[in-house]
């Protein structure tokens, strides 16, 4: 046996006092500090409206106030928290603010935050059943609860990932595997026995689908963008024609992506018809319901989802309209074995010696090995609110949205730019002096949005629909009340009057 000379035989290292200084924060210090931190958290949540939704700062200003290097010596919690309160909290975009109407909201609910705290303390990594039995089995249970709550059949199994982007990436990798070319083993580059592969999604589908094609080595060129109708819904005849043309050109269709709740306008693709086409063509159907899927927990509101039970995979994000703290995305698949074929790789050191062989090892279904334990926060939240509580909150958001959309429709100089199937309203101001000048209307509405966001009371974002600058008001924050939506409308009208047409 040789001695490792790189470790100094330093007697000080064995000094008990020195060793005590090498331990983690001691439990009693942790307890006191944690109570203090919980107070900071509760203060933030109880009075988040004291902050602007968008901090009025310029890029680089936070970093400029922080030292360039980490401290050499320990610092007391009080001074760390003082800096947190002075620098970090006020300069955070306030996603927890009831005036957050941008993108799609992502509230961290109280019970979800408690779940995050417990998760952090448990320090789990449910990559294998053995590395987190309760984490793994709770994930299986929570996936089952969500599946049932969404009204989907037992045939769907699944897991929790970080984001819809990852969920869709996994789904498309499985779609490619299902096409029978065993890309997991053989890859696709340079193969003469594999044609170019094609994925189909509407021109309104989320960029994460395109990114998945990039990441999977299919390239952006593999994504065929199918036109939409005047309601921004995929035109199935155009999908059929594109697939026929691609087959004639000897490319291989592998997946169709239907979106229920597109990002710009929340339009709903004709899922049932697309399921018919996918079945007939023998290609994988993936449904991206990252935002709107939450609505399906209400059986009375499931009409837009009709046909999704025939999908091969579905993504719904609890971290969007179900108020789980970022991150939590639910990926369900009726062909979970194929998902495993696409990702399973078990090096010797990860083999469970003496295991029952029936345990779920979630790393076999994902590109990464280590995983967060996301199930705990979702479980706590589902129990705290109950499904009925979640449904009532969603219905409330839908009511608030309808009222705002009705205000826009009733106002003479404003127009809706898309139907409103869920909780997002797409609109613009059209003053008579500008009504025939699209470029001026774009600039005018961009200025209105900037003015409104500049108040700090609300945050709205925009998109382009048919090339037109479109303001979006997306309701989804758990704290948003009618008064906040009414205030947004008041601010918009004021800004429209203030902004001088070009
Ligand atoms: C329809 C849709 N799909 C996917 C995504 C991507 O979500 P994530 O940030 O979880 O990757 C979004 C984001 O808003 C979305 O609207």
Image (spheres, rainbow, N blue to C red):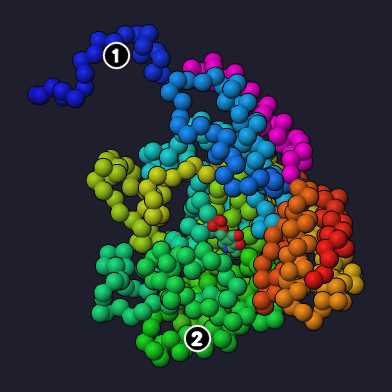
Residue 126 versus residue 460 in the image, above or below: above
Mark 2 residue CB less than 8 A from any atom of ligand 1 = no
Q: Residue at x 60, y 52 (%)?
A: 318
Residue at the outermost front position:
502
Label 2 belongs to which residue?
242
Residue 49 lies in magenta, yes or no? yes
Q: Earlier in the sequence, mark 1 or mark 2?
A: 1
Range shown magenta = 25-52
Residue 276 visible (yes or no)? no
CA neighbours of label 2 inside 10 A, class few (<14), some (14 to 19), many (20+)? some
Between 142 and 456, the one nearer to me in the picture: 456
Between 357 and 338, the one nearer to me in the picture: 338
Residue 54 visible (yes or no)? yes
Q: Position of residue 19 (x, y in %)?
A: 36, 13
Q: Position of residue 245 (x, y in %)?
A: 45, 89
Label 1 belongs to which residue?
13
Q: Residue at x 37, y 39 (%)?
A: 130
Total residue callouts: 2
Between 203 and 59, the one nearer to me in the picture: 59
Secondary structure type for disc 1: helix
Between 413 and 405, the one nearer to me in the picture: 413
Secondary structure type for disc 2: helix
Q: Position of residue 66 (x, y in %)?
A: 54, 34
Give residue 323's mark.
none
Q: Is residue 222 left or right of residue 49?
A: left
Quarter occupied by the C terminus: bottom right
Q: Which is the main secondary structure of the residues drawn in magenta? A: helix
Q: Position of residue 212 (x, y in %)?
A: 45, 65
Split into quadrants, the picture shows ligand 1 in the one at bottom right
Quarter occupied by the N terminus: top left
Q: Residue at x 57, y 26 (%)?
A: 80
The reply to whether discs 1 and 2 touch (Cβ–Cβ < 8 Å) is no
């Amino acid at each position: 046996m040789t001695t490792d000379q790189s470790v100094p035989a330093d007697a000080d290292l064995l000094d008990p006092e020195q060793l005590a200084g090498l331990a983690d924060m001691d439990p009693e210090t942790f307890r006191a500090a944690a109570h203090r931190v919980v107070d900071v958290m509760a203060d933030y949540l109880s009075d988040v409206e004291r902050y602007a939704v968008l901090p009025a700062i310029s890029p680089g200003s936070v970093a400029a106030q922080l030292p360039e290097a980490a401290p050499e010596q320990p610092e007391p919690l009080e001074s760390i928290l003082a800096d947190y309160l002075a620098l970090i909290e006020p300069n955070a975009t306030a996603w927890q603010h009831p005036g957050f109407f941008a993108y799609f909201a992502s509230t961290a609910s109280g019970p979800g935050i408690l779940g995050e705290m417990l998760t952090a303390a448990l320090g789990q990594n449910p990559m294998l059943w053995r590395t987190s039995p309760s984490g793994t089995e709770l994930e299986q249970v929570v996936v089952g609860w969500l599946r049932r709550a969404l009204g989907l059949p037992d045939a769907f199994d699944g897991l929790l990932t970080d984001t819809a982007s990852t969920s869709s990436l996994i789904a498309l990798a499985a779609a490619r595997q299902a096409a029978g070319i065993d890309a997991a083993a053989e890859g696709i580059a340079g193969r003469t026995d594999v044609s170019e592969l094609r994925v189909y999604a509407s021109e309104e589908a989320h960029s994460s689908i395109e990114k998945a094609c990039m990441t999977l080595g299919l390239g952006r060129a593999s994504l065929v963008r199918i036109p939409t109708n005047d309601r921004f819904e995929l035109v199935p005849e155009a999908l059929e024609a594109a697939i026929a043309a691609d087959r004639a050109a000897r490319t291989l269709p592998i997946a169709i992506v239907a979106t229920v709740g597109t990002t710009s306008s929340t339009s709903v693709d004709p899922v049932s018809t697309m399921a018919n086409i996918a079945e007939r063509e023998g290609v994988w159907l993936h449904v991206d319901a990252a935002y709107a899927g939450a609505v399906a927990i209400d059986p009375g509101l499931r009409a837009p989802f009709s046909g999704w039970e025939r999908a091969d995979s579905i993504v719904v994000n609890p971290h969007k309209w179900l108020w789980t703290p970022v991150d939590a995305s639910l990926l369900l698949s009726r062909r979970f074995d194929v998902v495993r074929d696409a990702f399973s790789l078990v090096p010797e050191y990860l083999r469970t010696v003496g295991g029952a062989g029936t345990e779920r090892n979630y790393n076999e279904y994902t590109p990464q090995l280590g995983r967060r334990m996301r199930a705990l926060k979702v479980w706590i939240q589902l129990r705290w609110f109950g499904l009925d509580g979640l449904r009532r909150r969603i219905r409330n958001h839908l009511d608030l949205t309808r009222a705002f959309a009705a205000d826009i429709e009733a106002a003479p100089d404003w127009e809706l730019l898309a139907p409103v199937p869920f909780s997002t309203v797409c609109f613009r101001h059209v003053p008579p002096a500008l009504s025939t000048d699209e470029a001026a209307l774009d600039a005018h509405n961009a200025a209105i949005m900037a003015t409104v966001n500049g108040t700090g009371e609300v945050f709205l974002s925009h998109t382009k629909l048919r090339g037109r600058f479109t303001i979006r008001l997306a309701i989804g924050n758990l704290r948003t009340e009618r008064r906040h939506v009414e205030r947004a409308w008041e601010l918009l009208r004021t800004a429209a009057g203030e902004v001088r047409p070009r």
